[in-house]
Image (cartoon, helix red, strand yellow):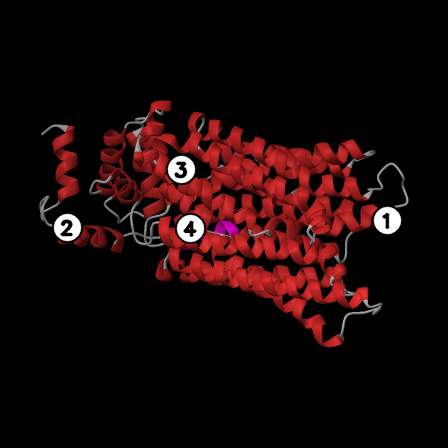
């Protein structure tokens, strides 16, 4: 019996080609023998990277107010310099996305994740030792590069190691660790100065380097390189000793053979490539146009403008809300499905940004009539609006675009397409964060939030019409949907 015949026998099982119920029963029987312990361990090691990424994103919020008041003139940030300090990390992240796209194809997911810890550590070390503003900028760019690589590699690593029953939950843990990192920095910023904060931020990347030494490469990458024995060893580690991993290995290998393992530019004319790529890019565009990164980068400044005296504490509360609701999203992701959560998330953000705009409009109207403070009964409106926005984002548009990107892009184009998606995300993040202050002046605070509300309405329409549901499907089945065939 040749290899192709044996592979088809493993795929078809006793039920034969024509009985999808039999195939599903075999799939369920396989999953019933899977042990998830080591899969969870590998996922935890990987998501320490997104925690580092969260530290980078959140660092500017407590650091900018302190560096704006620092006594050393060489390190003191003006308003324009503070804007660059907050936003320049996104330039590094865009470059990191391009670099990460090349790395994941050439050296694999595991080594890419291990190597991206180096610019994290070097970047924070430069910030710690900063003697002038340029050292701040270089440190932020380096940590941005690491963040860009992380934002591409970790979702791919988890989607390629997890099976369909837990892929949504584990994939959502990427965003959960990002927001946990942001909250950790906000909380530490209440008690530490900017240098000690940078020292703490360099610890998780070091742990990633050590932990990933003991974790496997993804089976799909190994099979795409023709390394079947190593792929079986990786699957045995991830699925436990009782699972008949030859069945899953054959299914993945069959899909790899069907679509090929090499990317050519002509593949961009294939609906199985350009449709998931376009959907992923637009998901990232709409994610950034909700205004989330602008809001998180300048959280304290927003609350100061909203007349909250304890703006740093308010930022911690907002981050806590984000952690709680991202955790809820992770728990229900594989039950509720991706599309439902995206729609609920978009509607929540549309309502909250509209309300926040109303608050700022009323505040400015009160100021124009020489009122020193906003009416006491309106101050709750800003905090409630921000809380609803953060909760809404966390339950859908925070984790799901990254999850869907890692699910729908075919394995042979994951380097190129993943780089394009990450570049579009961080490119938009730079545009929004760098222009946020200018938008607040040009459109007024109220107008800026109403613009975000319009974008939230558009993302709901986009989700309903174009985004596919990937809940409960294998990566091979998702690829088959875009190719217009029936997957294994």
Residue extent of the magenta highlight: 169-176
Above or below, 360 against 198 in this view is: below
Tell me if 269 is positioned left or right of 146 in this view.
Answer: left
Q: Is residue 29 magenta?
A: no
Distance Cα–Cα, label 4 vs label 1: 44 Å
Q: Which residue is mark 1?
A: 69
Q: Residue at x 52, y 37 (%)?
A: 424
Distance Cα–Cα, label 1 vs label 2: 66 Å
Above or below, 214 against 466 in this view is: above
Element under label 2? helix
**Foreground pick, 49 / 457:** 457
Distance Cα–Cα, label 3 vs label 1: 45 Å
Of the two numbered discs 4 and 1 on the same chain, state the one appearing first in sequence.
Answer: 1
Q: Which residue is mark 3?
A: 277
Of the two numbered discs 3 and 2 on the same chain, state the one appearing first in sequence.
Answer: 2
Q: Residue at x 57, y 41 (%)?
A: 428
Q: Which residue is mark 2?
A: 20
Element under label 4? helix
Res. 321 in view: no
Element under label 1? helix
Residue 233 % position (x, y): 32, 37
Where is the N terminus found, in terms of image quarters? top left
Q: Is residue 172 magenta?
A: yes
Circles 3 and 2, Cβ within 8 Å, touching? The answer is no
Tell me if 437 is positioned left or right of 325 in this view.
Answer: right
Q: Which residue is mark 4?
A: 462
Distance Cα–Cα, label 3 vs label 2: 29 Å
């Amino acid at each position: 019996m040749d290899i192709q015949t044996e592979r088809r026998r493993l795929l078809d099982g006793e039920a034969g080609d024509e009985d999808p119920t039999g195939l599903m029963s075999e799939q369920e029987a396989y999953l019933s023998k899977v042990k998830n312990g080591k899969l969870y361990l590998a996922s935890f090691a990987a998501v320490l990277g997104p925690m580092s990424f969260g530290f980078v994103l959140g660092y500017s919020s407590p650091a900018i107010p302190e560096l704006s008041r620092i006594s050393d003139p060489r390190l003191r940030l003006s308003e324009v310099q503070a804007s660059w300090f907050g936003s320049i990390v996104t330039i590094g992240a865009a470059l990191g996305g391009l670099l990460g796209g090349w790395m994941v194809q050439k050296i694999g997911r595991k080594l890419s994740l291990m190597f991206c810890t180096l610019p994290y550590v070097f970047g924070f070390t430069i910030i710690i030792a900063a003697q002038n503003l340029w050292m701040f900028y270089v440190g932020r760019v380096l940590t941005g590069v690491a963040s860009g690589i992380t934002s591409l590699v970790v979702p791919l690593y988890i989607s390629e190691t997890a099976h369909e029953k837990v892929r949504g939950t584990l994939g959502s843990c990427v965003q959960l660790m990002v927001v946990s990192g942001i909250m950790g920095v906000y909380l530490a910023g209440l008690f530490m100065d900017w240098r000690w904060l940078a020292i703490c931020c360099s610890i998780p990347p070091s742990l990633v380097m050590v932990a990933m030494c003991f974790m496997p490469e993804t089976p799909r990458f190994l099979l795409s390189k023709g390394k079947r024995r190593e792929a079986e060893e990786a699957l045995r580690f991830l699925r436990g000793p009782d699972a008949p991993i030859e069945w899953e290995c054959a299914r993945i290998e069959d899909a790899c053979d069907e679509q090929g393992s090499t990317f050519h530019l002509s593949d961009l004319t294939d609906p199985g490539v350009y449709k998931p790529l376009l959907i992923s890019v637009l998901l990232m565009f709409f994610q950034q146009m909700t205004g989330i990164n602008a809001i998180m980068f300048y959280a304290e400044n927003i609350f100061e403008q909203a007349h909250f005296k304890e703006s740093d504490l308010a930022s911690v509360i907002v981050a806590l809300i984000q952690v709680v609701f991202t955790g809820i999203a992770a728990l229900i992701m594989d039950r509720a499905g991706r599309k439902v959560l995206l729609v609920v998330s978009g509607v929540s953000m549309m309502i909250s940004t509209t309300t926040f705009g109303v608050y700022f409009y009323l505040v400015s109207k009160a100021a124009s009539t020489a009122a020193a403070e906003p009416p006491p009964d309106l101050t709750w409106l800003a905090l409630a609006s921000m809380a609803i926005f953060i909760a809404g984002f966390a339950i859908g548009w925070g984790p799901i675009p990254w999850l869907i990107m890692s699910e729908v892009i075919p394995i042979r184009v994951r380097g190129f397409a993943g780089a394009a998606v990450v570049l579009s995300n961080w490119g938009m993040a730079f545009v929004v964060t760098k222009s946020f202050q200018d938008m607040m002046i040009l459109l007024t605070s109220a107008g800026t939030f109403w613009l975000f509300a319009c974008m939230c309405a558009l993302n709901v329409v986009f989700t309903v019409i174009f985004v596919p549901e990937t809940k409960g499907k294998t990566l091979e089945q998702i690829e088959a949907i875009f190719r217009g065939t029936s997957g294994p």
